[in-house]
Image (cartoon, rainbow, N blue to C red):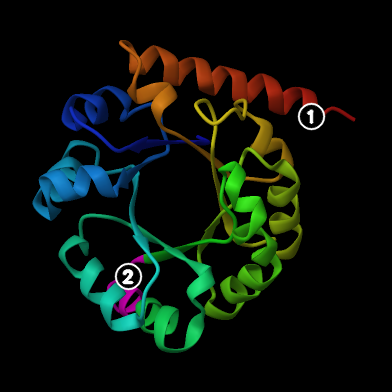
Amino acid sequence: MTLVAAIDRDPAEELVSKLCRVVAGFKLGIPLLLRYGAAYAHRLRKLCRDALWIADLKLADIGSTMVASVEPLLGAVDAFIAHAVVGVEGALDQLANTLEEHGTKLVLVVAMSHPGASSLYNKLVEDNIEVARRIRAWGVVAPATMPELVALVRSRLPEVKVFSPGVGAQGAKPGDALCAGADYEIVGRLITSSPDPLEVAKKVLAEQKKRLERCWKP
């Protein structure tokens, strides 16, 4: 499966139960976690144990602060997202060591999906890729709205899992990032704002499949 559902709002329990068998995983956003707390994440995990669970706490700080931020969620998720731009020493090295001790994966944002990212953040994509390589990140985030950056990341980090947000509300179409080399597309509001999220998720998967069939034809 190539779809990760981003959940930033309630009712999450019903959503997780409906999507459990059709998505690869769930990304829990900071609005949801701030509202309901770490215990809520542990409870959601029990509803779909076999899925990939990712916490997106917008981690971009010194190491000790990031470590303290993830501690309440250790055991509830399989991976945490942090920003590569903060660098290694005194920051991501400490976070990576803590996560490794707990058997938890690190996913680094190397480029972002909104238009304003092109003016500064995404100009650092090569440096961010190098940070991901140095820290041996399990995964990276690169924008579905900018497939050329996804392709660049894939070429530089062939063994790393690539997650691509921006499908739907931000304009990218299902399959765009997959064709550029992503492993997963992260889809939020397109699914979570729908009155029938399961049906929309199935349509996204069908569109991804069709798009992949077209782009991989010789």
User: 99 or 70: nearer the eye?
Assistant: 70
At 43% across and 66% down in the image, what residue appears? 106
Q: Quadrant of residue 97?
A: bottom left
Residue 81 lies in magenta, yes or no?
A: no
**Residue that extends furthest to the bottom in the rendered view of this protein:** 89
Relative to 144, does residue 121 appear above or below in the rendering?
below
| Residue 188 screen position, x and y as percent | 41, 32
Which image quadrant is residue 125 in? bottom right
Residue 101 in view in this figure: yes
First to last magenta residue range:
98-104
The x, y position of residue 135, in whole percent, is: 52, 78
Q: Residues within 10 Å of mark 1 (few under 14, many from 20)?
A: few
Please tell me which residue is depicted at 30% across the width and 73% down the height of the picture.
Answer: 66
**Residue in front for this viewpoint, 117 or 158:** 117
Q: Secondary structure at mark 2?
A: loop
Q: Which mark is residue 103?
A: 2
Q: Amino acid at mark 2?
A: Gly
Residue 130 lies, in percent from the top left, at: 65, 75
